[in-house]
Amino acid sequence: MTLVSYSCTDGVAHLRLERPASANAFDLDTTREFRQAVDRAADDPDVRAVLVSGDGPRFCAGGDVASFVAADDPPAYIHQLASELDQAFAALAAMAKPVAAAVQGAVAGAGLGLLLSADVAVAAPGTKFVFAYPGIGFTPDCGVSWLLPRAVGSQRALELALTGRVLDAATAQDWGLVAMVDEDPLGRACVLASSWAKGPAVALGRTRQLLRQGWESDRTSTGAREADTISDAVRGEEAQRLIAAFVAGRRSGS
């Protein structure tokens, strides 16, 4: 049974969670299939942009609690799951290709980590966003305690984490958890990813890397990394072609 489907069309790799009966929650098998899909998209030179979605009425409920309960050694299982899922999300966040996410229904727990590992997220109007961990006596995983404050600010992250508040899609957009709310989130995200794939995808991928790395770097290191990246970009075919077109346009007055 496929737990995470993978397809590539016109330069866009589509990674879709395929456990709708379990709200696309991650167990260890699903985590490993997702990591394989992430690595495949990252390594394929024909992939220029990535789209992440979840099948069924809910995007992702986080970790699969049923798999925790069924494990012979729950603490060891949860540690393994949290570690491998964090590595998968980190790989998604680090790849040199822009990532769009389409979300609907519910985004909870580690689902927030997946959402925030994408660059631009589009949500259906009825989507609910919830921290969820304390409700089952858990603490966050998958980088959520690092990602969430950077997305919405410390006070809002703490409110979401400590009160159990459920955010609607409009509030999630206002807070910065998602960029857009659309009746057809998958369609909108597909259009977005396709535009990236047809555009200067190398520059876009490197830009998303710089912006994400900037969270962890000081000002001087960030500027130095930018200088290295932009000088490297100038050597590439993409920049050479776009610069030539820009200069030709200036000369023709168009």
Image: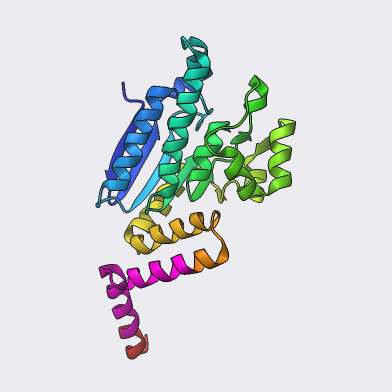
* Front in this rendered view, residue 107 or 69: 69
Q: Is residue 83 above or below residue 184?
A: above
- How far across and down, in percent of the image, does residue 137 sit? 66, 21
Residue 248 located left or right of residue 65? left
Way the structure is coloured:
rainbow
Q: Is residue 77 above or below residue 241?
A: above
- How far across and down, in percent of the image, does residue 83 sit? 47, 31
Residue 99 located left or right of residue 108? left
Q: Is residue 236 magenta?
A: yes
Asked whether residue 199 appears in the rendered view, the answer is: no
Q: Is residue 99 magenta?
A: no
- How far across and down, in percent of the image, does residue 231 sit? 36, 72
* Front in this rendered view, residue 164 or 86: 86
Asked whether residue 33 appears in the rendered view, the answer is: yes
Could you tell me which residue is drawn at 50 percent across and 31 percent down?
A: 60
Q: Number of callouts in the render?
A: 0
Residue 163 located left or right of residue 91? right
Tell me where the magenta segment starts and ends, as one range: 224-247
Quadrant into which the N terminus falls: top left
Quadrant into which the C terminus falls: bottom left
- How far across and down, in percent of the image, does residue 23 sit? 50, 25
Q: Is residue 138 above or below residue 72?
A: below
Magenta stretch: helix, strand or loop mostly: helix
Could you tell me which residue is drawn at 40 percent across and 29 percent down?
A: 31
Could you tell me which residue is drawn at 71 percent across and 30 percent down?
A: 164
Q: Is residue 132 above or below residue 121?
A: above
